[in-house]
Amino acid sequence: MAGLYIILMGVQGSGKGVQADFMRDHYGIPHVSTGDLFRAMKMRTDPLAQQIQEIMESGQLVSDEITNQVVRERLEQPDAKNGAILDGYPRSLGQAQWLENYLQSRGERLTAVLLLDLDLYQAFRRAFGRVTCSSGESYNIYSNSDGIEWAFVEDPNKQFPPRLEATLKATGEKLIRRADDASAHAIVQRIDTYLHTTQPLIDYFEGKGLVQRVDASKPIEGVSCEIKRVINQMRK
Ligand code: AMP
């Protein structure tokens, strides 16, 4: 059977990570995130790894040439022989075209571009409202707030708007908010960057009939179920 090559796209908060894990387990193909691959290079001291680290720190994109090379090496690992879930890649039309040509040279093709569709206001609330406790359990002040109490706390110097703080009712533990989730501005900026980089790619793949939209506002299991249905259909 032909391999399963899925490009996974979705705004932050759309559940990309959870659904990538689901597909990895269900289809036995690895989750290939170029961001993770590049971050893993931090441990290396060779010039290429150092160059990549500098680019990432500056918030820029790594060149298509280097990115494609890293993806090629990853897709040639034995665990990717039946396909892969690509996350954070492609991020440019050059990468998209390279990937298609590369797969073709191996007698393979892209199976689908899965777009986890989420209303942007919901995406904002999923990130902005997210709090975790020390055991790793996650809550959301908007959608999953049973067991937690939240309140606005004034900045003592009144220089900044009030901060939102959440506490676990049962133990009084203060819940943690990722610094980049606590900043509305940073969240909006991440959403904006996502829209700008992905839209040309969505248009490109749409022209090839590869884009499949999945409603990501449903509960996790419902989204997984829909993903299975869509992949089955695209595999035929
Ligand atoms: P991410 O975790 O996907 O947000 O990626 C973190 C950083 O890695 C990005 O800001 C880029 O510097 C780099 N990166 C990840 N994927 C790509 C890609 N497909 N093309 C270029 N740079 C990438």
Image: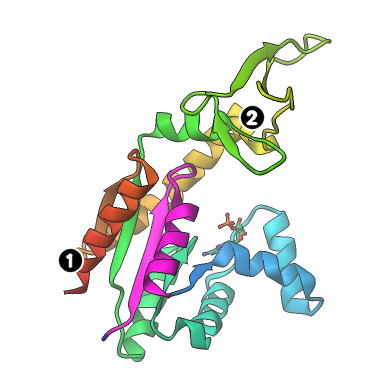
Residue density around tag 2, few if under 14, some if 14–19, many if 20 or more, within 10 Å: some
Give me the residue at 36% from left, 50% from top. Answer: 199
As drawn, is 119 to the left or to the right of 182?
Answer: left
* Percent coordinates x, y for residue 204 in the rendering: 29, 61
Residue 195 within the segment the image draws in magenta: no
Q: CA distance from mark 1 to mark 2?
A: 40 Å
Q: Quadrant of residue 154?
A: top right
Q: Nearer the viewer, mark 1 or mark 2?
A: 1
- Residue to which mark 1 is pinned: 233
Up the image or down, 181 lies above or below 117; here it is above
Q: Could you tell me which residue is drawn at 40 percent across and 60 percent down?
A: 8
Which amino acid, mark 1? Answer: Gln
Give the answer, above or below, for where 37 lies relative to 191.
below
Q: Is residue 16 left or right of residue 167?
A: left
Which residue corresponds to the image point at 44% horizontal and 70% vertical from the top-left? 95
Could you tell me if residue 77 is visible in this image?
yes
**Amino acid type shown at disc 2:** Ser
Magenta stretch bounds = 2-28
- For the N terminus, the image quarter is bottom left
Ligand 1's image quarter is bottom right
For the residue carrying disc 1, how many other residues have a C-alpha within 10 Å: few (<14), some (14-19), or many (20+)?
A: few
Residue 27 at x, y percent in the picture: 37, 72
Q: Front-most of 166 and 129? A: 166
Q: Is there a contact, CB below 8 Å, between mark 1 and mark 2?
A: no
Which residue bears the numbered disc 2? 183
Please tell me whether mark 1 sits on a helix, a strand or a loop: helix
